[in-house]
Amino acid sequence: MFITKNKKIVASLVLANVMLFSSPPGFAKPITMTPKQEYESATTSIRGLGWPMREIEPLDAVLNELMVFNPDKLRKYTDGKQRGIPNIYVTYKNVNNSYTVVGGSIIVSNDFLNTLLYNRAKGYPEKINDVPAYRQSAAAAVVAHECSHWYRDDALSDLNLIFANDETKQREAQKYINEGKYMSLFRMEIDLIKNASQSTLEAYRRASILKEDRADIDGMDFLNNHPVLSVGGMALFMNCVKEDELNKNGKDINDHRSLNERYDVSIDYIRKLSNGRVEIRNDLLYLDGQKFMGTGRLPARRDVTAYDRTIYVAGQLASAINHNLSAKSGSITFKGKYIENLYRTKKMTYFVVEPAGSEKPFFVMDFVPIEINRLNAILEKRVHPQNDEERVVVEIMNFLNKK
């Protein structure tokens, strides 16, 4: 879960606010769910909320990409034999937030998507290919954060916490699950929350902050395995939310650290991932202690701001170092033709890095308006860079090729 409106913990029946222990005090046997019961619970949760929502291609595509490149941790629900994420939805209810319900379905608010993906000139994107990779990474950070809640089974842990002090209620809750009476379970859960003491809610909140910290880190770990979606997306998201007018009207963050603190953590993740070689200081990019291109910023273009591009590339550089990649360029093929159609113009070239002669993952460093033959000539040092876009490529190449 990202941001909430209220100081009380409400509607916890379906939202993933978790305590960081597996068996709460007083529990002889924790509440459990089979993969099928999780799916049924998620379906009931979505229906029970009664919020206007639908599935959209851009979110489906991002979730699928995270699963493809994190197959040991993330998967789609299929046949009930193993846990899986059922669906991802956008809701049009006025909640500037994202959620993971019991059972793993993910809900992202339309407010978030408007902030991250909406183009005032072109309208709302119907296809993920209409969205530059820079803002895709910010949207993917939200989804990856919620994927962590499913992966850690946070919502079920939350159920165990809520019923921890009442063994009779705990047994009744398990009975409801076994009988498929999920709405009865949720109504009982809400009742317990409403009657919880302030000290219990405060303890709940403190633990919730810790699990949200964990979800941010997990989310960036998931992004680190993807060749296009940058770990810098988490910082991009935090910055977008800071600038969003919806969050300047007194909305409180009750189960997260402040946005500034979370932004600092995401920036520090990039530094640690690169062994200190890639740093963001005051929103400027430093490579091996030197400002990138002398300014600390990549140039802006019509499709991307200087800030978004700088943070995106910082994250991709850190991942390249983490995966021991060096500079290379070229056109590439990709599962599902994800990259081939990412930009609708033929004027953009993917600046790719990968190990020579290896099948290991490649990483796209940036998208540059340079014809491929010209780009190869620059990388092979047959010609000198003539403009800022070409100098970006050279500086990245020289940095990655340092021993």
Image (cartoon, rainbow, N blue to C red):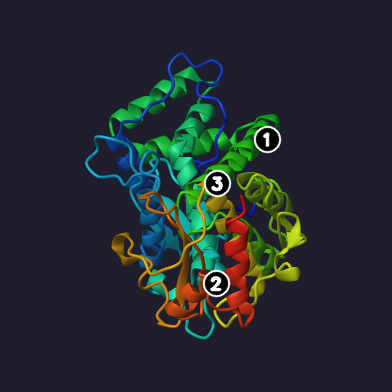
Q: Residues within 10 Å of mark 2 (few under 14, many from 20)?
A: few
| Amino acid on which disc 1 is placed | Arg
Q: Residues within 10 Å of mark 1 (few under 14, many from 20)?
A: some
Q: Is residue 51 left or right of residue 290?
A: left
Q: Which mark is residue 206?
A: 1
Find disc 3 in the rendering and name its residue.
Answer: 322
The foreground one among 269 and 166 is 269
Q: Mark 2 touching mark 1, by CB under 8 A?
A: no
- Local secondary structure at mark 1: helix
Q: Give the quarter of the image for residue 231.
A: bottom right
Q: Give the alpha-carbon distance from disc 3 to disc 2, as whole Å.
A: 26 Å
Percent x, y of residue 37: 30, 36
The foreground one among 99 and 73 is 73
Find disc 2 in the rendering and name its residue.
Answer: 381
Vertical relation: 161 (above or below) 112: above
At horizontal 60% and vertical 69% (from top left) the residue drawn is 394
User: Residue furthest toward the left?
Assistant: 79
Closer mark to the observer between disc 2 and disc 1: 2
Percent x, y of residue 229: 48, 59
User: Residue furthest toward the front?
Assistant: 382
Q: Mark 3 touching mark 2, by CB under 8 A?
A: no
Q: Is residue 296 at least partly visible in the picture?
A: yes
